[in-house]
Image: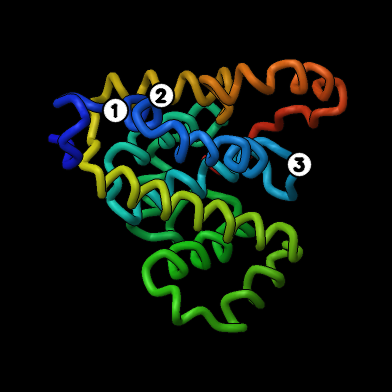
Amino acid sequence: MPLLRSLPADATLVDLRRMFADLLDKLRPYAERLMRGPSALTPGERELIAAFVSGANSCRYCYGAHSRVARAFGVDEAVLVTLLDDIEAAPVDNRLKPMLRYVRKLTETPNRMTEADAAAVYEAGWNDEALLHAIAVCAYFNNMNRLVEGTGIVGTSEHYSVAAQRLVKQGYLRGSAHRSQKSRSRRKSKSSPRRRRTKFKG
């Protein structure tokens, strides 16, 4: 049951965005740039972090949707389940593990980040840009997790699937923001990086 009295009983994130579009639509261009724009991290790696952070926060709506988006980019759901239980035992590329340890610690105990945490990421072969992007994805989804849970939006498996399909097909600029920037997206399409599937050990 939503905690905002103005929302319908079966409210989804779409309802929240529609009702408070003046505030929440402003997040969309940033999310599109963060999750689909140029980065040292592939879209699949960014979606993995999004789902992982949402799972660490026990955010039902965001984990439900983004675990499905991550799956569309080649991340098996069993990998996410294992990661949330034990990062070291998860069948993912070893160079991703210090990055995932970093964002989990940043999520759970942000005031305890140390140089050693960053050094482990660098030693795995990542650079400053990659670490900053991981931090930004972590921060964005901590924000979204609290926005969704704070307003009491839970959703159903069907809602998660619909949201995931939209994110895979349309990205983060769907809706009014997507329409308003459609022409610009077309002009940039030729120079946009091709989607790469994230490789995971199985």
Three-letter residue code for mark 2: Ala
Between the residue at mark 2 and the residue at mark 3, the CA separation in whole angstroms equals 23 Å
* Residue that mark 2 sits on: 163
Between the residue at mark 1 and the residue at mark 3, the CA separation in whole angstroms equals 29 Å
Secondary structure, mark 2, is helix
* Residue 107 position by quadrant: bottom left
Three-letter residue code for mark 3: Pro
| Chain-order first, disc 1 or disc 3 | 1
Q: Is residue 94 left or right of residue 112?
A: right
Between the residue at mark 1 and the residue at mark 2, the CA separation in whole angstroms equals 9 Å
Which of discs 1 and 2 lies nearer the camera? The answer is: 1
Q: Residues within 10 Å of mark 3 (few under 14, many from 20)?
A: few
Three-letter residue code for mark 1: Thr
Mark seen at residue 12: 1
Evaluate if marks 2 and 3 touch, with contact meaning CB atoms under 8 Å apart.
Answer: no
Of residue 92 and residue 150, the one placed in the foreground of this image is 150
Q: Residue 21: give x, y in percent of width and height.
A: 44, 31
The residue lying at 38 percent from left, 60 percent from top is 86
| Chain-order first, disc 1 or disc 2 | 1
Secondary structure, mark 3, is loop
The residue lying at 25 percent from left, 49 percent from top is 150
Q: Residues within 10 Å of mark 1 (few under 14, many from 20)?
A: many
The residue lying at 67 percent from left, 40 percent from top is 33
Q: Is residue 172 above or below residue 148?
A: above
Q: Is residue 35 above or below residue 178?
A: below
Q: Residues within 10 Å of mark 2 (few under 14, many from 20)?
A: many
* Residue that mark 3 sits on: 38
Of residue 147 and residue 5, the one placed in the foreground of this image is 5
